[in-house]
Image (cartoon, rainbow, N blue to C red):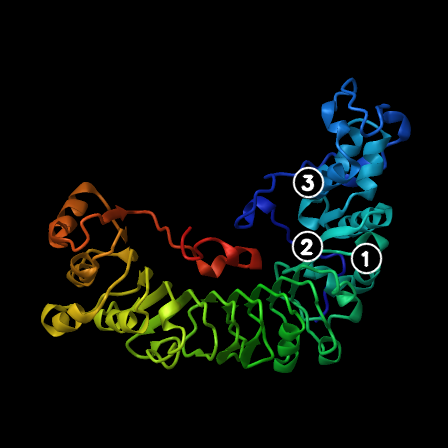
Amino acid sequence: MEMEAATPIPKKRRSEVPGSNQPEEISSHEPAAAAMEAPESDIRESPTPGAGGAEDGVGHISGLPDAVLGDIISLLPTAEGARTQTLASRWWRRLWRSAPLNLDYYDLPAEGDVLIRLISQILSADAGSGRQLCISAHHLYHHAATVDAWLRSAGLSNLQELEFCCAGYRPVLPAATASTFRLSSSLRLATFSQCRFPDSIIQVLHFPQLKQLTLGEVGISEGSLQSVIVGCPVLESMLLSHCIGFSCIRVCSPNLRTIGVRVGYRSKLVGISIEDAPCLQRLLQLGLTRGLDISIISAPNLETVGRLRYDDTYGFSFKGFPTLFPVVAHTVKTLSIVVVPLSVDMVLDLMCCFPCLEKLYIQICSSGRKNLWRRKHQSHIKCLDIRLKKVVLANYRGTLSDVNFAMLFVLNAKMLELLRFEVQGCCDEELIERQRRLLQLGNRASRGARFVFTKNTCLRKLEDIKHVRYLSVADPFEC
């Protein structure tokens, strides 16, 4: 497949990326290169750092140590960091060029070949050590030699964050070269997208400081994936999204706390084996794949699991339920499931499998059955110690099936603090009042429980999690 080298790179503003706090727009009339090339005569003299002078309009910020000022500049968006050179004097220019480099192509007001030249210009002028380099995977495909030169730049020495972000389309996956991993010894965060990892390179790699890893639409063999995980001894978070080339993920990691897996339509993944993960707290399935065989051998601190899928035909998306978690069942406190149809029998099995569950998120896809439980399960329910504190029912329709299902928690969850109904359709006062009567809220088992009816959907769309950073939010299932 051939594509023109000058094909524009689809860019989104950072404000369009979930969880971003970057400025909504970047002005295009003052590019970073223009600030970098401002003539000396156009920049006013000012006191040297530490002098504390305020006559140049900079104020007491001039009195801060160079190291602090450099860190401030490096935390700014790339174009804004470059513009600090115009604020006061030559020492700002010196600080910009020596500050830890934070180069993110999203922040640069350029496209295509102009963007390529601008990145090259910034890297050639920077004399500091690298903090972050974020470029499109598109560059690996169309400008492999240029990317190779970038990664050899002195300005990227000791780089902490390297991101090859997914392009807006899926090219034929190019093979990552050895230079792609030249900085592996210093990286703390890495994102690799839309490329292939040759076995000859990966199996000798070591990432001694890497804590966060994202592989998106990457082609990698099962043995090489295992080598990557083993080669990251301090890895804490890992996101695998739409990757191909392996059928099983085997995890042996002393520090891994969060795993997020999204299975793509080209993927052959059939199983995840958690063999030894003493610190693992979260296991997140970010899609709704059926029949994924999960084996948990040792994960004594697992607290959060989701999103499981249940339906009448296939049962749970995780094979082996409810004997799936014989070791870690008592540690799981938060669970998210999608049900087709809604089933009281299924939930009672969950309560047996996860006796210490405190938060339960249920996305209802269809009702279908009556969900009568008083005669069928009353004696069984009395033996259960239901510790649920929070239950969320998304796509709640208020049908008889939904009401009977919800009453299981209303009348039996003695520690319940919140039951939230995310109503599908009209959610007016008349509906709320009718539902309160049908649910017999006056007879609730927990006198302090709150019952909230809302039109708004507060469940997080796990399908939208595309960066490893978002796996570490306080509650991955709550917006």
How far apart in space, not on screen, are marks 1 and 3 (Cα)? 21 Å
Q: Residue at x 80, y 60 (%)?
A: 151
- Residue, far top: 55
- Residue 467 visible from this viewpoint: no
Q: Is residue 324 above or below residue 362?
A: below
Q: Is residue 326 above or below residue 372?
A: below
Q: Residue at x 71, y 56 (%)?
A: 160
Q: Secondary structure at mark 2?
A: loop
Q: x, y (%) of residue 406?
A: 20, 59
How far apart in space, not on screen, are marks 2 and 3 (Cα)? 23 Å
Residue closest to the eye, 339 or 294:
294
Indicate the quadrant where residue 317 lies: bottom left
Q: Are marks 2 and 3 in contact (CB under 8 Å)?
A: no
- Of mark 2 and mark 3, the one earlier in the sequence is 2
Q: x, y (%) of residue 97?
A: 83, 42
Q: Are marks 1 and 3 in contact (CB under 8 Å)?
A: no
Residue closest to the eye, 262 or 169:
262
Residue closest to the eye, 39 or 237:
237
* Disc number placed over residue 76 in the picture, else none: 3
- Reading the image, the residue beneath label 2 is 9
Residue type at mark 2 is Ile
Residue type at mark 3 is Leu
Q: Residues within 10 Å of mark 1 (few under 14, many from 20)?
A: some
- Reading the image, the residue beneath label 1 is 150
- Residue 297 visible from this viewpoint: yes
Q: Secondary structure at mark 3?
A: loop
* Disc number placed over residue 278 in the picture, else none: none
Q: Secondary structure at mark 1?
A: helix
Q: x, y (%) of residue 48?
A: 85, 28
